[in-house]
Image (cartoon, rainbow, N blue to C red):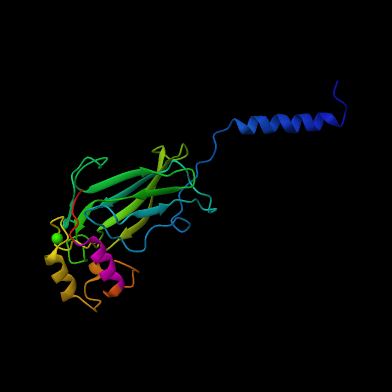
Amino acid sequence: MLSFWCRPLALFVGCGCLLSVAPAAAQIPDPSNSVVPACLNVAPNGTLPVDVHVADESGVPVANASVTLEFTCGNLAACGSESFCCSTFPIRYCESTDGSGNATFNPAMGGHCCGDEACDVSASVHASVPDVAHPNGVRLVCLKTYEHVGSPDGTGDLVVNLEDYVLLEENWVSTTYPCLDLAGCDGFVWFADFYVFSDHFLTQCE
Ligand SMILES: [Ca+2]
Protein backbone atom coordinates (compact mmCIF):
# COMPACT_ATOMS: atom_id res chain seq x y z
CA MET A 1 0.00 0.00 0.00
CA LEU A 2 1.30 3.45 -0.88
CA SER A 3 2.05 5.81 1.96
CA PHE A 4 0.64 9.34 1.97
CA TRP A 5 3.93 10.80 0.65
CA CYS A 6 4.31 8.24 -2.06
CA ARG A 7 0.91 8.90 -3.61
CA PRO A 8 1.72 12.33 -5.13
CA LEU A 9 4.92 10.86 -6.57
CA ALA A 10 2.99 7.97 -8.08
CA LEU A 11 0.51 10.41 -9.63
CA PHE A 12 3.37 12.51 -10.98
CA VAL A 13 5.05 9.48 -12.55
CA GLY A 14 1.70 8.46 -13.99
CA CYS A 15 1.27 11.88 -15.61
CA GLY A 16 4.78 11.57 -17.00
CA CYS A 17 3.84 8.30 -18.68
CA LEU A 18 0.74 9.90 -20.17
CA LEU A 19 2.80 12.78 -21.54
CA SER A 20 5.32 10.42 -23.05
CA VAL A 21 2.76 8.81 -25.38
CA ALA A 22 1.81 12.16 -26.96
CA PRO A 23 3.40 12.78 -30.40
CA ALA A 24 6.82 14.35 -30.10
CA ALA A 25 7.03 17.86 -31.48
CA ALA A 26 8.73 17.93 -34.86
CA GLN A 27 12.22 19.35 -35.09
CA ILE A 28 11.76 22.18 -37.55
CA PRO A 29 14.87 23.07 -39.59
CA ASP A 30 16.05 26.59 -38.83
CA PRO A 31 17.96 28.42 -41.61
CA SER A 32 19.85 30.56 -39.10
CA ASN A 33 21.25 27.52 -37.29
CA SER A 34 21.73 25.35 -40.38
CA VAL A 35 24.89 25.53 -42.47
CA VAL A 36 25.05 25.59 -46.27
CA PRO A 37 27.84 26.75 -48.62
CA ALA A 38 28.10 30.51 -49.00
CA CYS A 39 28.68 30.04 -52.74
CA LEU A 40 27.65 27.17 -54.98
CA ASN A 41 30.07 25.59 -57.45
CA VAL A 42 29.78 22.34 -59.39
CA ALA A 43 32.08 20.21 -61.55
CA PRO A 44 31.39 17.60 -64.24
CA ASN A 45 33.33 14.95 -62.33
CA GLY A 46 31.34 15.65 -59.15
CA THR A 47 34.33 16.60 -57.02
CA LEU A 48 33.01 19.92 -55.67
CA PRO A 49 30.83 18.62 -52.81
CA VAL A 50 27.94 20.59 -51.37
CA ASP A 51 27.86 20.01 -47.61
CA VAL A 52 24.64 20.79 -45.72
CA HIS A 53 24.07 20.73 -41.96
CA VAL A 54 20.47 20.93 -40.75
CA ALA A 55 19.70 22.11 -37.21
CA ASP A 56 16.56 23.31 -35.41
CA GLU A 57 15.95 26.59 -33.59
CA SER A 58 17.92 25.32 -30.58
CA GLY A 59 20.88 24.35 -32.73
CA VAL A 60 20.16 20.63 -32.28
CA PRO A 61 20.98 18.60 -35.44
CA VAL A 62 17.94 17.31 -37.32
CA ALA A 63 18.38 13.67 -38.35
CA ASN A 64 16.51 12.07 -41.27
CA ALA A 65 15.48 15.40 -42.78
CA SER A 66 14.94 15.31 -46.54
CA VAL A 67 17.31 17.81 -48.16
CA THR A 68 16.81 18.97 -51.73
CA LEU A 69 19.42 20.71 -53.85
CA GLU A 70 17.66 22.22 -56.84
CA PHE A 71 19.06 24.04 -59.86
CA THR A 72 16.59 26.19 -61.75
CA CYS A 73 18.90 28.05 -64.14
CA GLY A 74 18.82 26.97 -67.77
CA ASN A 75 22.54 27.53 -68.37
CA LEU A 76 23.52 24.38 -66.51
CA ALA A 77 24.08 20.84 -67.73
CA ALA A 78 24.20 17.61 -65.77
CA CYS A 79 25.86 14.27 -66.37
CA GLY A 80 23.22 11.59 -66.90
CA SER A 81 19.96 11.52 -65.00
CA GLU A 82 20.14 8.42 -62.85
CA SER A 83 21.04 10.32 -59.70
CA PHE A 84 18.07 12.67 -59.80
CA CYS A 85 15.18 11.92 -57.54
CA CYS A 86 12.47 13.75 -59.43
CA SER A 87 13.15 15.16 -62.86
CA THR A 88 15.95 16.30 -65.11
CA PHE A 89 14.79 19.93 -65.06
CA PRO A 90 14.77 21.59 -62.72
CA ILE A 91 17.83 19.52 -61.89
CA ARG A 92 17.10 18.22 -58.44
CA TYR A 93 19.14 16.06 -56.07
CA CYS A 94 17.80 14.61 -52.82
CA GLU A 95 19.58 13.32 -49.74
CA SER A 96 18.64 12.56 -46.13
CA THR A 97 20.55 13.91 -43.17
CA ASP A 98 22.45 11.43 -41.03
CA GLY A 99 22.31 11.24 -37.23
CA SER A 100 24.44 14.39 -37.00
CA GLY A 101 22.16 16.38 -39.30
CA ASN A 102 24.61 16.26 -42.20
CA ALA A 103 24.02 15.58 -45.89
CA THR A 104 26.51 15.82 -48.75
CA PHE A 105 25.75 16.25 -52.44
CA ASN A 106 28.23 15.64 -55.24
CA PRO A 107 26.48 17.15 -58.25
CA ALA A 108 28.15 16.15 -61.53
CA MET A 109 27.39 19.28 -63.53
CA GLY A 110 28.81 22.10 -65.57
CA GLY A 111 27.83 25.50 -66.90
CA HIS A 112 27.29 28.90 -65.34
CA CYS A 113 24.49 30.92 -63.84
CA CYS A 114 25.86 34.41 -63.40
CA GLY A 115 22.74 36.42 -62.71
CA ASP A 116 22.19 37.42 -66.33
CA GLU A 117 19.54 34.77 -66.90
CA ALA A 118 15.80 35.15 -66.72
CA CYS A 119 15.62 33.54 -63.29
CA ASP A 120 16.44 35.44 -60.10
CA VAL A 121 17.15 32.23 -58.22
CA SER A 122 19.64 29.90 -59.88
CA ALA A 123 19.65 27.26 -57.16
CA SER A 124 18.22 26.56 -53.72
CA VAL A 125 18.58 24.22 -50.76
CA HIS A 126 15.44 23.07 -48.91
CA ALA A 127 14.95 20.77 -45.94
CA SER A 128 11.68 19.04 -45.05
CA VAL A 129 10.53 16.98 -42.07
CA PRO A 130 7.26 15.25 -41.15
CA ASP A 131 5.14 17.54 -38.96
CA VAL A 132 1.72 16.39 -37.77
CA ALA A 133 0.99 19.94 -36.61
CA HIS A 134 1.26 21.27 -40.17
CA PRO A 135 -1.78 21.08 -42.48
CA ASN A 136 0.26 19.31 -45.17
CA GLY A 137 1.84 16.93 -42.67
CA VAL A 138 5.25 18.12 -43.85
CA ARG A 139 7.22 21.22 -43.01
CA LEU A 140 9.33 22.50 -45.91
CA VAL A 141 11.96 25.11 -45.08
CA CYS A 142 14.15 26.98 -47.54
CA LEU A 143 17.69 27.09 -46.14
CA LYS A 144 19.23 29.26 -48.86
CA THR A 145 18.79 30.49 -52.40
CA TYR A 146 21.66 31.25 -54.76
CA GLU A 147 21.83 33.92 -57.42
CA HIS A 148 24.96 32.40 -58.97
CA VAL A 149 26.19 28.90 -59.72
CA GLY A 150 29.80 28.52 -60.86
CA SER A 151 31.88 25.76 -62.40
CA PRO A 152 35.34 25.17 -63.88
CA ASP A 153 33.33 24.06 -66.93
CA GLY A 154 32.26 27.56 -67.87
CA THR A 155 31.10 26.60 -71.35
CA GLY A 156 28.71 23.97 -70.02
CA ASP A 157 29.76 21.18 -72.40
CA LEU A 158 30.63 18.98 -69.40
CA VAL A 159 34.35 18.95 -70.27
CA VAL A 160 36.92 21.24 -68.60
CA ASN A 161 39.33 22.14 -71.36
CA LEU A 162 41.11 25.00 -73.15
CA GLU A 163 37.88 26.84 -73.96
CA ASP A 164 37.14 27.07 -70.26
CA TYR A 165 40.65 28.27 -69.56
CA VAL A 166 40.17 31.10 -72.08
CA LEU A 167 37.03 32.13 -70.19
CA LEU A 168 38.98 32.16 -66.95
CA GLU A 169 41.77 34.19 -68.53
CA GLU A 170 39.29 36.75 -69.88
CA ASN A 171 37.99 37.32 -66.36
CA TRP A 172 41.32 37.07 -64.53
CA VAL A 173 41.79 39.46 -61.58
CA SER A 174 38.30 40.85 -61.77
CA THR A 175 34.97 40.79 -60.00
CA THR A 176 32.93 40.95 -63.19
CA TYR A 177 32.30 37.22 -63.46
CA PRO A 178 31.42 35.71 -60.06
CA CYS A 179 30.76 32.32 -61.67
CA LEU A 180 34.50 31.76 -61.81
CA ASP A 181 34.90 32.58 -58.14
CA LEU A 182 35.51 28.91 -57.44
CA ALA A 183 37.15 29.27 -54.02
CA GLY A 184 36.71 31.49 -51.02
CA CYS A 185 33.45 33.11 -52.13
CA ASP A 186 35.08 36.54 -52.20
CA GLY A 187 33.68 37.54 -55.59
CA PHE A 188 37.18 37.86 -57.02
CA VAL A 189 38.80 35.63 -59.68
CA TRP A 190 42.32 35.03 -58.45
CA PHE A 191 44.92 32.33 -57.77
CA ALA A 192 42.79 30.36 -55.31
CA ASP A 193 40.16 30.02 -58.04
CA PHE A 194 42.79 29.09 -60.61
CA TYR A 195 44.01 26.26 -58.35
CA VAL A 196 40.48 24.82 -58.24
CA PHE A 197 40.25 25.19 -62.01
CA SER A 198 43.61 23.48 -62.59
CA ASP A 199 42.56 20.59 -60.31
CA HIS A 200 39.68 19.99 -62.73
CA PHE A 201 41.48 20.66 -66.00
CA LEU A 202 40.79 17.91 -68.57
CA THR A 203 38.12 16.28 -66.40
CA GLN A 204 34.61 15.40 -67.52
CA CYS A 205 31.60 13.31 -66.56
CA GLU A 206 32.60 9.95 -65.10
CA1 LIG B 1 33.81 23.23 -71.03
Give the left or right position of residue 21, taking residue 32 as reference.
right
Does residue 65 show up magenta in the picture? no
Q: Residue furthest bottom?
A: 173
As rendered, which of 130 and 204 lies closer to the eye? 204
The total number of labels drawn is 0
Is 85 situated above or below 69?
A: above
Q: Which image quadrant: the N terminus? A: top right
Does residue 195 show up magenta in the picture? yes
The reply to whether residue 53 is in sight is yes
Looking at the picture, how far across and down is residue 137, in whole percent?
Answer: 41, 37
Q: Residue at x 22, y 48 (%)?
A: 91
Magenta region, residue range? 192-201
Which quadrant contains ligand 1? Answer: bottom left
Q: Quadrant of residue 43?
A: bottom left
Is 168 situated above or below 78?
A: below
Give the left or right position of residue 175, taking residue 54 as reference.
left
As rendered, which of 203 and 27 lies closer to the eye? 203
As rendered, which of 29 and 138 lies closer to the eye? 29
Q: Quadrant of residue 38?
A: bottom left
Looking at the picture, how far across and down is residue 74, in whole percent?
Answer: 16, 55
Q: Residue furthest top?
A: 1
Is 85 situated above or below 184?
A: above
Q: Residue at x 55, y 53 (%)?
A: 58
The reply to whether residue 188 is in sight is no
- Prevalent SS, magenta region: helix
Looking at the picture, how far across and down is residue 112, in whole percent?
Answer: 19, 62
Q: Residue at x 33, y 69 (%)?
A: 185
Looking at the picture, how far across and down is residue 201, in whole percent?
Answer: 20, 62
Q: Quadrant of residue 190?
A: bottom left
Is 143 situated above or below 174?
A: above
